[in-house]
Image (tube, coloured by chain):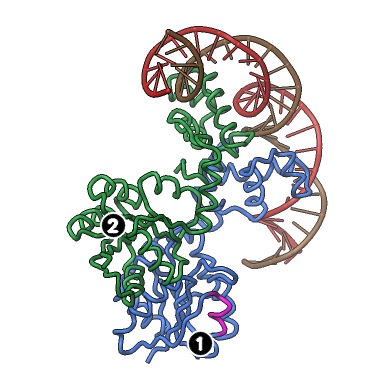
Chain colours: A blue, B green, C red, D brown
Amino acid sequence: MIRLLIVDDHPIVRGGLRDTFADAEDIVVVGEAGDGAEGVARAKALAADVVLMDLRMPGTDGVAATAILREEAPNARVLILTTFDGESDVLPAIEAGAFGYLLKDALPEELARAVRAAARGESVLAPSVTQHLMGQVRRPGAGTLTDRERQVLQLVANGSSNREAAAALFIGEASIKTHLQHIYDKFGVRDRASAVAEGYRRRLLT
Amino acid sequence: MIRLLIVDDHPIVRGGLRDTFADAEDIVVVGEAGDGAEGVARAKALAADVVLMDLRMPGTDGVAATAILREEAPNARVLILTTFDGESDVLPAIEAGAFGYLLKDALPEELARAVRAAARGESVLAPSVTQHLMGQVRRPGAGTLTDRERQVLQLVANGSSNREAAAALFIGEASIKTHLQHIYDKFGVRDRASAVAEGYRRRLLT
DNA sequence: TCGCGTCTCCACCGTTCGGTGGACCGCCGG
DNA sequence: CCGGCGGTCCACCGAACGGTGGAGACGCGA
């Protein structure tokens, strides 16, 4: 019998998931949690085998909770279940130790299969996620901005001139220009406006 | 008895919603749909009183479906139910004729109350939505770009200089500059980079 | 230990951009 | 019928930006 814990901040989604596993005779939902911290606590207290975890949650989010669980309850296999197939969250989640990454589009049967696979220690990825993951591995580094570059781009998107961005980061204007040049190179663009656009398209900016 | 139709592309969410209304004796879920077009068809066929509609769906999205329903089934009251409290979707949805705008954070009881209110012809808005709506009404028209301005902004986001954008639209460079100035005024920004950022935030750009 | 990546900074130059204050036209609605 | 809005265009100026080609310092991993 697989002991399953559901972690999602939406009561409706929790209800739907609980329902989904009601028919599965080899899976029992041992508990629910509404945020990451609660999820970690319950996973330990209830000795969950598999944790179905939402990514976007108030407070401790899914990635952080997954990382904590890897440390404190290594027996619990985490399955990420999210609405977004946006590229940005996949890698952090997997780095944090998630066993799978599923989309909420998934059919109930797919979910049950994924839970069983995770319980066996196998990995399950949604097709679109697999594709994206391959794309990442293929170009290691390229197309990824450094932390500093992201900061600069965010400031520029918020209306900072080079001078203002420099002041905000306590560095020289020349450094801002260098960072921007590197961003242009990585994105294949020629000016700050399209760099900002590309930043939004790659979901690096909010 | 209130006849309720659920329109959402996620089976899990549909299941959770169906569950939510199982207890309500004055509400009966008469059907479900997985996209906007299907939702419109079912709303008409099933004579739904209230339609609980997700915004983000493949194909016909919630806003489009709402607009069609206003035309073809004016008796059906549409309640938008979405994960995002992002500013961008509220106005289009309400303009399209939605009776309410709720977030999926809502508790089951709140949902039931909202459905009953909509059936009575009242409007229900999530608190954060109300706040945003007031902010919008305060500046009527301001913040909306004209078609031409959107075209210019899109070109700029794609890396065009003023000269290139002018060539693309077969107008003079001076006109591009004028359009950009108007965009800056409307957005409250000072340069093209942050105008592009604002364009993405308002979901005017893709 | 030796690279490689990251972050920092410099100078110079041409080009582009942003700000301002206009102007004219066509169209629609009061 | 006239005002407002959207679209087009003009000139001028200073400031900011983009391009180039460097360079030194640090830390991490091979």
Which of A77/B42 is in front?
B42
Q: Kindly identify the amino acid type of the residue bearing the numbered disc 2.
A: Asp
**Outermost residue to the front:** B120
Which of A132/A86 is in front?
A86
Residue B123 in picture, x, y percent from top left: 41, 55
Q: Residue C20 vs residue B67: left or right?
A: right
Q: Kindly identify the amino acid type of the residue bearing the numbered disc 1.
A: Asn
Please, what secondary structure does the residue beneath circle 2 have?
loop
Q: Which residue is mark 2?
A: B35
**Which chain is disc 2 placed on?**
B
Q: Decide: marks 2, 1 in contact (CB < 8 A)? A: no
B49, above or below C12, in the image: below
**Outermost residue to the bottom:** A1
Residue B53 in picture, x, y percent from top left: 34, 58
- Residue drawn at point x = 49 percent, y = 71 percent: A9
Q: Residue B79 vs residue A45: left or right?
A: left
The quarter of the picture where residue D1 lies is top left
Write down the region rendered in magenta: A35-41
Please, what secondary structure does the residue beneath circle 1 have?
loop
Structural crowding at the residue carrying mark 2, measured as other residues with C-alpha within 10 Å and reported as few (<14), some (14–19) or many (≥20)? many
Q: Which residue is mark 1?
A: A75
Q: Quadrant of the N terminus of chain B?
A: bottom left
**Which chain is disc 1 placed on?**
A
A3, above or below B152, in the image: below
**The label number, if any, that marks residue B72 in the structure image:** none
- Residue drawn at point x = 29 percent, y = 69 percent: B27
